[in-house]
Image (tube, helix red, strand yellow):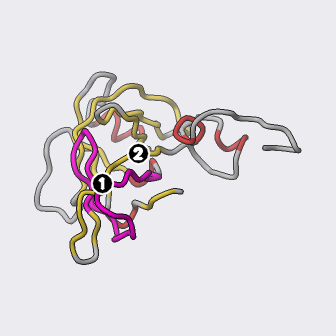
Amino acid sequence: MADGRNVARDSAREILGRADIEQIADLKEPGSVLEATVEAHEDTLTILTLPAGTLRIPRIDSPPGRTVRLRVQPRDVILATEPVSGISIRNRLQASIESIDEADRDQKLISLLVGNQVLKARVTLDATTDLGLSEGNTVFALIKTVALETTR
């Protein structure tokens, strides 16, 4: 809604992923909404599954089997061209680059296919060039556990 008018009508996933999100909502950049299923709770974490893999998030009060939505900011997604180990980031999803768009003068907004869902990553032009990122490439999306939060 803007000035009493409906300016966007679609699913939360579609609206939050729009490149013009700054004009239609009080958000700085498009993001991603991933749907996952609560698998289990371990101490302070909740384990979620989605077709592309497993995610760990700070513990939430949802029973196993419930579907939840996660809002992921593009700036919280790190890309690797090979599987990574020996780091503190526990959330690693294999993905395919769907598209690469301009974000700012020196940054790219990369849309990734993670299973049947889209995850966006904000990457510098230097990293995009250095890693040889292009449409169709397979990459690994790394997301810090503390960066993930559920939406309602």
Work out which quarter of the rendered image holds the N terminus and state it.
top right
* Range drawn in magenta: 47-71
Front one among 61 and 22: 61
Rendering coords of residue 20 (x, y %): 65, 36
**N-terminal-most mark, 2 or 1:** 2
Q: Residues within 10 Å of mark 1 (few under 14, many from 20)?
A: few
Q: Which mark is residue 34?
A: 2
- Inspect the magenta stretch and tell me whether residue 70 lies in it: yes
Front one among 141 and 66: 66
Q: Is residue 130 above or below residue 43?
A: above
Is disc 1 placed on a helix, strand or loop?
loop
Comparing labels 2 and 1, the label whose residue is closer to the camera: 1
Q: Is residue 99 above or below residue 89?
A: above
Is disc 2 placed on a helix, strand or loop?
strand
Residue at the disc numbered 1: 65
Rendering coords of residue 59 (x, y %): 34, 71
Q: Is residue 65 above or below residue 12?
A: below
Residue plotted at (39% across, 40% down): 119
Residue plotted at (24% across, 36% down): 139
Amino acid under disc 2: Leu
Task: Give me the C-alpha separation between circle 2 and circle 1.
Answer: 16 Å
